Image (spheres, rainbow, N blue to C red):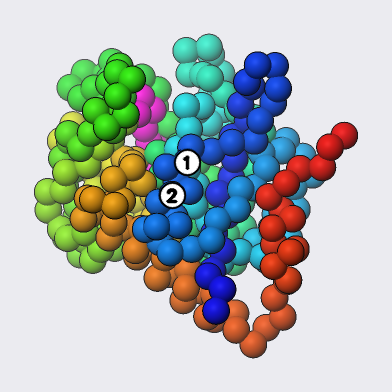
Amino acid sequence: MSKPVVAIPADIREIEGNVWQATPNQYVRAAVKGADVTVFLVPALEADNDFDGILDRVDGLLVSGSRTNVHPSLYGKEATDAEGPYDRARDATSLPLIQRALERGIPLLAICRGIQELNVVLGGTLANEIQDQPGAWDHRKPDTPVLDVAYGIRQKVMVKEGSCLAGIVGAGEVQVNSLHRQAISDKAPRLAVEAIADDGTIEAVSVIGAKAFAVGVQWHPEYWVGSDQPSNSLFAAFGEAVRDYAASKQGHDRPAQADVLAFGSVKSA
């Protein structure tokens, strides 16, 4: 039996003058190994993506982190260089996919930029350079080329008793690797806080009344999914939700595998 399929929205990257559709390999690896799914990337396009056509062909949506930030105009603020860099094609791809996945009851796991996008989709706002706010902890990624150090598990969050996340990783103190300079400011009304940092930063949320698994975390469980139990448990829970959704589609017409894979490429001009 073929594995269920999870979509990951890509980012735009310019490398040596060429524009690339890309996502960090750590997210793909975590989905394949931690959630036991097949992955394809959704091209980041400012127009022309068929979101329902894409979601017809998948069983889950994983929204990755990125070095870019959600454009402030999307949550009612003026854009400045300090809040960049931006990726309008990523915004135009991820946000509609999140919206339609929630409406359709497709399992969703949103990480780092993903939790911020989830908050914006549901009507919330974001705060920038949170490390400069009084009493805030410095959540930024350490300046080191050694990724195991940069993504080291170094911060605790408190997972709320009785929350969705508590059922996955346990309630109370959990050690994580939270790396960000933006965070949720005004929380969207449909989001429930699942975990917070010592400085009050919202570190995890779930969607109230969601039809399926819909969780966002500010940290990076994808990096240590093979060795850290909370990270592994989160991806395993997402994988189970994806398989449940795929099973619910049995008996309905599904597209051929060739059609599914076609969405991972972009036609040349």
What distance separates the C-alpha of mark 2 from that of mark 1? 6 Å
Where 156 falls versus 68 (above or below)?
below
Q: What residue type is disc 2 on?
A: Arg
Which element is circle 2 on?
helix
Badge 1 density bin: few <14, some 14–19, many ≥20, Cα 10 Å: few
- What percent of the width, then of the height, locates residue 242? 47, 68
Residue that label 2 marks:
29
Q: Residue furthest left?
A: 173
Q: Residues within 10 Å of mark 2 (few under 14, many from 20)?
A: some
- The residue nearer to you, when weighing 186 against 146, is 146
Where is the C terminus found, in terms of image quarters? top right
User: Residue 194, can we see it?
Assistant: no
Residue at image location 40% in from the left, 39% down from the top: 112
Identify which residue is drawn at 30% across, 16% down: 143
Q: Quadrant of the N terminus?
A: bottom right
Provide residue 266's location: percent of width, then percent of height. Answer: 76, 43
Mark on residue 25? Answer: 1
Q: Quadrant of residue 140?
A: top left
Whether the residues at callouts 2 and 1 have beta carbons within 8 Å, the answer is yes
Q: Residue at x 73, y 71 (%)?
A: 256
Residue 157 location, quadrant: top left
Determine the secondary structure under disc 1.
Answer: helix
Compared with 241, 176 (above or below) is above
> In this rendering, would 47 be left or right of 83?
right
Near-viewer residue (7 or 92): 7
Q: Up-down: is 107 above or below 80?
A: below
Overall secondary structure of the magenta stretch?
A: loop
In this rendering, is residue 78 above or below 55?
above
Magenta stretch, residue numbers: 180-189
Asked which quadrant contains residue 138, the reply is: top left
Q: Is residue 41 visible?
A: yes
Identity of the amino acid at label 1? Answer: Asn
